[in-house]
Amino acid sequence: MGFKCGIVGLPNVGKSTLFNALTQTAAAQAANYPFCTIEPNVGDVAVPDARLDTLAAIAASAQIVPTRITFVDIAGLVRGASRGEGLGNQFLANIREVDAIVHVLRCFEDDDIAHVEGRIDPVGDAETVETELMLADLESLEKRIVPIEKKAKSGEKEAREPFALMMKALALLREGRPARLADLTPEEREPYRQLGLLTEKRVLYVCNVEEASAAGGNRYSQMVEAMARRAGAGCVTISARIEEEVAQLPAGEREGFLASLGLAEPGLNRLIRAGYDLLGLITFFTAGPKEARAWTVTRGSRAPQAAGAIHTDFEHGFIRAETIAYEDYVAGKGEAGARDAGKFRLEGKDYVVQDGDVMHFRFNA
């Protein structure tokens, strides 16, 4: 199951530098001019999880396979993108294809790197992008709702739900508020998502700071953190230049380099985990002599859905799931010890998978 986070922002905020470090490649051009990224670059990145290494050691696994998340570096947006300014149409089309938005904001001063609007104002930059996305959503909905409204008013049952959901979104957008703030029932969430609204997507703000502020942030990042709290969004502070340097170092030298800067781990680890959390994802594991592997499912998934993440046949023929909580697996030093301690469970189709579960599925072929 694939999950995509689109990296967006105004030109010259450090998007491509961050993407290059994230994927440890030079696939995305990083240059001091707008629109240097013409086609969206895609990077498939492992989600760091120390639990997987622990399980592999206990199970004496020959191979370790982490779960993964995809990041897409999308062309820089400028004011007027909703009307097709710059690469606006392409930007909007690309962002529709991702599951969540990682919004990089410039939180550093540097006279050698021009800001597209001539000032350093990360909160203003965030508002510029959000406004363009809201305008695009508003224009799209106002066109699409006309035929749906006619059908709903003529009594077509199939049109009533989409019309009601569109009206919820339009009410917000006309007030200058993003579609993600809609008050929805659990049953409405998936059809609402299928409306394909740009501002329905969750947002993670990334404060790109200068090297000296990587550990503690600065006044600009503090402004963004306050904005994120008000909006219920995620926020991570990173120095893209430091991350770029770390990505180029041999693995054995990275820890010492980070420690010299007062950093316990690469900021990208925090970004990846935050993106994973942003999408409401959890991890379950399979562990054995062949491999220890992490699998991704959405929070609230039941056991058959988790089985389907491994193979669709597992979901269709699901019988039950052999389940051990991660802490119990570690405490018992493996499956046998967990069984002896009474921590081995057989769960049925209604079991809601918990983050860290170590599972084995029984199914009919």
Image (spheres, grey):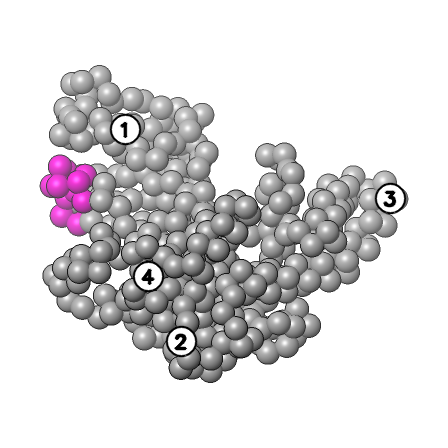
Q: Which residue in the structure is indicated by mark 2?
A: 110
Residue 60: say if magenta: yes
Q: How far, Cα to Cα, is label 4 from label 3?
A: 57 Å
Q: Which residues are magenta?
A: 53-63
The foreground one among 328 and 309 is: 328
The residue lying at 33 percent from left, 64 percent from top is 239
The foreground one among 291 and 229 is: 229
Report the side of 18 relative to 163 (left or right).
left
Q: Which disc number belongs to residue 58?
A: none
Q: How far, Cα to Cα, is label 2 from label 1?
A: 49 Å
Q: How far, Cα to Cα, is label 4 from label 1?
A: 39 Å
Q: Which disc number belongs to residue 153?
A: 3
Q: Which residue in the structure is indicated by mark 1?
A: 325
Judged from the image, the secondary structure of the residue bearing numbered disc 1 is loop
Is residue 123 visible to us here? yes
The residue lying at 67 percent from left, 63 percent from top is 136
